[in-house]
Image (cartoon, rainbow, N blue to C red):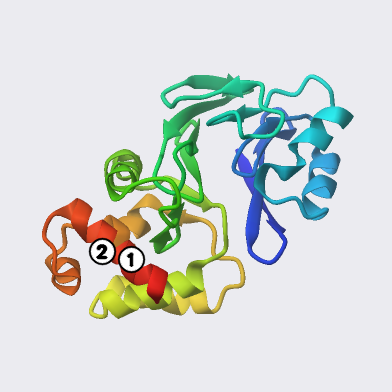
Amino acid sequence: MRIVPVPVWSDNYAYLLIDEKAGFAKMRIVPVPVWSDNYAYLLIDEKAGFDHAGGNVKMTELIPGLTVYGGDNRIPAMTSPLNGGEEFTLGSLKITAIRTFGHTDSSISYYVQDGDDKAVFTGDTLFIAGCGRLFEGTPEQMYDSLNIKLASLPEDTKVYVGHEYTKSNIRFALSVDPNNSRLKEMADIYNQSKMTVPSTIKIELETNPFMRVTDPAIQKVTGETDPVKVLGALRSMKDKF
């Protein structure tokens, strides 16, 4: 598979997921995916400036019969609701829906496998070196999403996120984990990059403070030892950072 990041607005990402065996784009993930065979239209649609799923209605009007997946009925033009755990194929690609609540109470991440090539689209739940605000969810839900579900994916899984927030996330991560040599190394790389996707699960486990909540250094900064409380404290600190 080939994944083409499509920057939208100032910091959003959409993605074209391409089944190279078929030779054309099969899915856009924004992070809610819409099936289509029209590569050119997808590029035009996302460049027009839709935020996440905001272009769904117009797309389904122009390309009838699309299947639109989503976590709840707030997703525009959704035809197929997901609860997490569903598996489906798209050409040669195997896709698994993962329920990753925390930022919202309906977030679905998409884990895609093409032989040994693996990727996960995490929307606004997991960011590079960070995580989403707890708008609707709880620290318990975010802990489950990050440190149980996403952390259990193979470490070489590429991570594609919903926003380019990496530089600000890195600054916060360094403030709470200043002695992390791997984090410093990645900070140098990211500071030279306008587009920082993809990360990997391995990199996030090594550098993302929200996925390092059992590390004594992170626990000391937060004054907590329970991993869920550590995550909640980190998120409160980041909100004020």
Residue 23: x and y, percent?
Answer: 74, 33
Residue 228 seen in render: yes
Mark 1 → mark 2, Cα distance in angstroms: 5 Å
Q: Relative to 27, say whether 138 is above or below.
A: below
Residue 8: x and y, percent?
Answer: 71, 58
Q: Judge left or right: residue 59 versus residue 164.
A: right
Q: Judge left or right: residue 86 versus residue 236.
A: right
On residue 190, the disc is none
In the image shown, does 20 or 147 lie closer to the viewer?
147
Q: The disc labelled 1 sits on which kind of residue?
A: Ser
In the image shown, does 172 or 202 lie closer to the viewer?
172
Mark 2, secondary structure of its residue: helix
Q: Which residue is mark 2?
A: 233
On residue 236, the disc is 1
| Quadrant where the image shows the C terminus | bottom left
Q: CB under 8 Å between callouts 1 and 2?
A: yes
Q: Judge left or right: residue 222 versus residue 151.
A: left
